[in-house]
Amino acid sequence: MPLSFTKMHGLGNDFVVLEAINAPIELTPAQARRIADRRFGVGCDQILIVGPPRAGNADFSYRILNADGSESGQCGNGARCFVRYVRETGLTDKKAVVVDIRDGQMTLEALDDDTFSVALGVPAFAPADVPLAGFAAARRYTLDDVPGGPVMFAAVSFGNPHAVLDVADIDTAPVATLGPALESHRVFPERVNVGFRQIVARDHIRLRVFERGAGETLACGSGAAAAVVTAIAAGTLDRDVRVDLAGGTARVVWDGPGTPAYLIGPAERVFDGRLAVAG
Ligand SMILES: N[C@H](CCC[C@H](N)C(=O)O)C(=O)O
């Protein structure tokens, strides 16, 4: 059945956006993989499905499928594209929208300078919430059975799991080896997104992310928030942080435990199209 789609990106993290307000869209993992394939399909890191609200106070619902066909409970860069999409397609004229995501709700806002703010929710640090198996709650965890020997990482969830490692220089970080090894490590029962963080100053980091289900992307919004809140919790960053990623710069603001983290940045619409999805 042919599907209309909109191609978008947030700092180079790219998306195929599908509108499922009037008619539901159900994609098998194989169909999602084909759409995401950069040769046999449209090509994207994630597929975003814009749906009707589930709860009474929400404006929309939001589903995220990774390029490997797996579903995630969060996508920060995608959320910025989501609010640009629903406004530019006339689905709403609101500047702030409430969106049902898999495990909760988010508020997304179009700002006056053509950037977008996403309240990603309150970060969850408890191992059971990440989820991270076999560890008691700690600021940092250590794993020995990974390439290159023991690694230390922080762990947090924004509705999707993140492990964050500190490196001296992200340009030489072992993203291609350590990323996949950690992504599918047995201590992460739902796999994990792996962030490689270089702290430049108390209000500035550089970051690369090997994403669960997509590999290294040019940017990861929830990964940026994970890198910032775990460092704020450890006392190494202040509350308002510039995050430099390969695809551009985002900003993360967090006022500490029990409060939501905010991700601020651009969202671009690239083109519209129609795709044939095999059965
Ligand atoms: N790969 C992620 C989903 C996309 C997150 C990322 N694109 C973002 O901007 O937050 C996961 O499986 O949890």
Image (cartoon, rainbow, N blue to C red):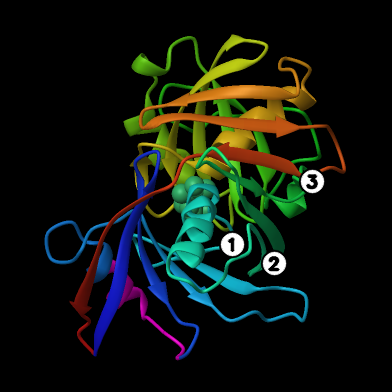
- Look at the numbered discs 2 and 1 and tell me whether their residues touch, using CB distance below 8 Å: yes
The three-letter amino acid code for the residue at tag 3 is Ala
Which stretch appears magenta? 23-33
Residue 211: name its quadrant. top left
Is 54 in the magenta? no
Q: Reply above or below: 22 against 92.
A: below
- Look at the numbered discs 1 and 3 and tell me whether their residues touch, using CB distance below 8 Å: no
Report the residue marked by disc 3.
Answer: 126
Disc with the residue nearer the chain's start (2 vs 3): 2
Residue 163 in percent (x, y) is at 58, 37
Residue 252: name its quadrant. top right
Report the residue marked by disc 2.
Answer: 103
Disc tally is: 3
Residue 72 in percent (x, y) is at 53, 62
Within 8 Å: ligand 1 and the Cβ of disc 1?
Answer: yes
The residue at the far left in this view is 39
User: Which residue is located at x 65 percent, y 15 percent?
Assistant: 203
Residue 258 in percent (x, y) is at 87, 43
The three-letter amino acid code for the residue at tag 2 is Asp
Q: Give how far apart the Cα atoms at labels 1 and 3 are.
A: 17 Å
